[in-house]
């Protein structure tokens, strides 16, 4: 149930952090997560090591970690057959058309 929320919200937050550290208040205003949903997604990103939080001049900032900067450039992995479930998938399930 929360997987889609965390995935979509996490992508939105990480997209806002591509250019460097950003105040948490600015990120809250630019994503479509509110209240506890924002806190949940931000906590999941910090637990997984993709984002870190720090204080600067009395404000809370977040930024991508090295892992976060590297992982944002990768798309989904479809496996050795490119998402086609093996080289015989088309013949086995759909026949020859």
Image: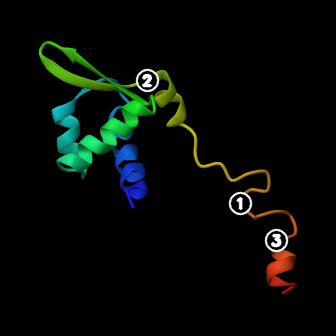
Q: Residue at x 36, y 28 (%)?
A: 19
Secondary-structure class at tag 3 = helix
Would residue 6 be found to the left or right of residue 91 on screen?
left
Q: Quadrant of the N terminus?
A: bottom left
Q: Position of residue 22 (x, y in %)?
A: 25, 27
Secondary-structure class at tag 2 = loop
Q: Residue at x 86, y 64 (%)?
A: 87
Front one among 69 and 60: 60
Would residue 72 be found to the left or right of residue 6 on screen?
right
Q: Earlier in the sequence, mark 1 or mark 3?
A: 1
> Residue 83, labelled with which disc?
1
Q: Earlier in the sequence, mark 1 or mark 2?
A: 2
How crowded pointer 1 is (Cα within 10 Å; few <14, some 14-19, many 20+) is rated as few
Q: Position of residue 54 (x, y in %)?
A: 26, 18
Q: Which residue is mark 3?
A: 89
How crowded pointer 3 is (Cα within 10 Å; few <14, some 14-19, many 20+) is rated as few
Inter-mark Cα distance, 1 to 3? 10 Å
Front one among 97 and 80: 80
């Amino acid at each position: 149930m929360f997987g889609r929320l965390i995935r979509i919200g996490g992508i939105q937050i990480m997209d806002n952090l591509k250019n460097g550290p950003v105040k948490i208040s600015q990120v809250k205003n630019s994503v479509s997560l509110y209240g506890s949903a924002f806190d949940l997604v931000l906590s999941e990103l910090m637990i997984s090591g993709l984002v870190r939080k720090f204080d600067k001049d009395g404000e809370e900032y977040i930024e991508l970690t090295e892992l976060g900067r590297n992982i944002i450039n990768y798309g989904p992995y479809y496996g050795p057959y490119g998402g086609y479930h093996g080289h015989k998938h088309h013949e086995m399930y759909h026949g020859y058309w």
